[in-house]
Image: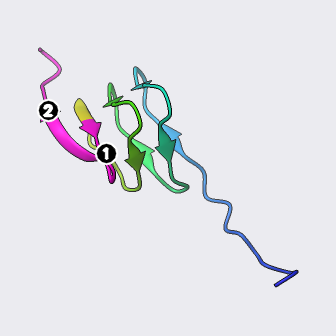
Amino acid sequence: MGRQVVGAAGVRTGPGCWLATNVVVRPGTTLGRHVTVGAGAVVGGDVPDYSVVAGIPARVVRCWTEAG
């Protein structure tokens, strides 16, 4: 147990991402462009562009297009 190896996968965030307070983003996660993550969410998978995610585990609750 003293020599445990932890994978060092990074988190990628696209431009315009917004993370509220107390958000947990797990290693290896990619957040797309203009993603909004709700307060207290735990994000463990890739999130598509122009999405709003919330909850534990985080789920897409709304999507929109670049045009609005």
Look at the numbered discs 2 and 1 and tell me whether their residues touch, using CB distance below 8 Å. no
10 lies left or right of 46: right
Query: x, y percentage for residue 52?
Result: 24, 32
Tag 1: residue type?
Answer: Val
Q: Is residue 1 magenta?
A: no
Residue pictured at 48% horizontal, 26% vertical = 21
Residue underneath mark 2: 63
Q: Quadrant of residue 41?
A: top left
Query: x, y percentage for residue 68?
Result: 11, 14
Pick the front one: 58 or 31? 58
**Alpha carbon distance from label 2 to label 1:** 11 Å
Of mark 2 and mark 1, the one earlier in the sequence is 1
Residue pictured at 28% horizontal, 39% vertical = 54
Pick the front one: 66 or 29? 29
Q: Quadrant of residue 2?
A: bottom right
Specify the farthest residue to the bottom: 1
19 lies left or right of 37: right
Q: Secondary structure at mark 1?
A: loop
Pick the front one: 55 or 61? 55
Query: x, y percentage for residue 50?
Result: 23, 29
Q: Is residue 62 magenta?
A: yes
Pick the front one: 17 or 20? 20
Region rendered in magenta:
53-68
Residue pictured at 12% horizontal, 15% vertical = 67
Tag 2: residue type?
Answer: Cys
| Disc number for residue 47 | 1
Q: Is residue 14 above or below residue 16?
A: below
